[in-house]
Amino acid sequence: MDYEAGTAVTPETGKDSSEKELLQELIRLQKKTADRQLVASIACVVIAVALGIAVLVVVPKVLRTAEEVSAMVQETEKLVAQAKTSLAGIDDMITNVNKVVVDNTQALTDAVGNIQNIDTDGLNTAIKNLSDAAEPLAKLNNQVSTWFGR
């Protein structure tokens, strides 16, 4: 801008303008700038309020979820500890069952051998002889009972 005794050449018009016109132009530009700054400030406030509301809504949910996850982790740790205890108990039980089987294998083998060695024909003959011997005793017992009135 060229300044001469109260006049200036403006880039917009290319004409000489008085100081009054220049001041009016400056005021108009400052109002535009102020309006733009006001819009930008309002936008920032709206964004800040939206973020504040989002934080107020989301943070409690995040905290609640974190507490639930923490409770689930604690419960899972308890269940894992119980599972370890149960597995140790099962291992002990299997060891004891194996010991019982090993300890009793010989006894079972001996018992099966003894059962196989039973002389069934001799046993049947002995039972028949016992029956034959018991039959006369039963008859005698019946006769004695009738004598005494029973």
Image (cartoon, rainbow, N blue to C red):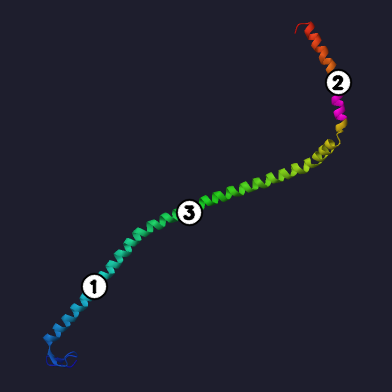
Residue under label 1: 39
Q: Secondary structure at mark 3?
A: helix
Per the model, the C-alpha gap separating discs 1 and 2 is 126 Å
Where residue 33 sits in the image (x, y, percent)?
21, 78
Q: Residue at point 45% right, 53% down?
A: 68
* Pointers 2 and 3 in contact (C-beta within 8 Å): no
Whichever of callouts 1 and 2 sits on the residue coming sooner in the sequence is 1
Whichever of callouts 3 and 1 sits on the residue coming sooner in the sequence is 1
Camera-side residue: 98 or 122?
122
Per the model, the C-alpha gap separating discs 2 and 3 is 84 Å
Question: Is 123 within the magenta?
Answer: yes
Q: Residue at point 20% right, 75% down?
A: 35
Residue under label 3: 70
Query: Type of residue at label 3?
Result: Ser
Horizontal side of residue 51 vs 82, given as left or right? left
Q: Where, quadrant-wise, is the N terminus in this rendering? A: bottom left
- Position of residue 31 relative to residue 134, above or below, is below
Magenta residues span 122-131
Q: Secondary structure at mark 1?
A: helix
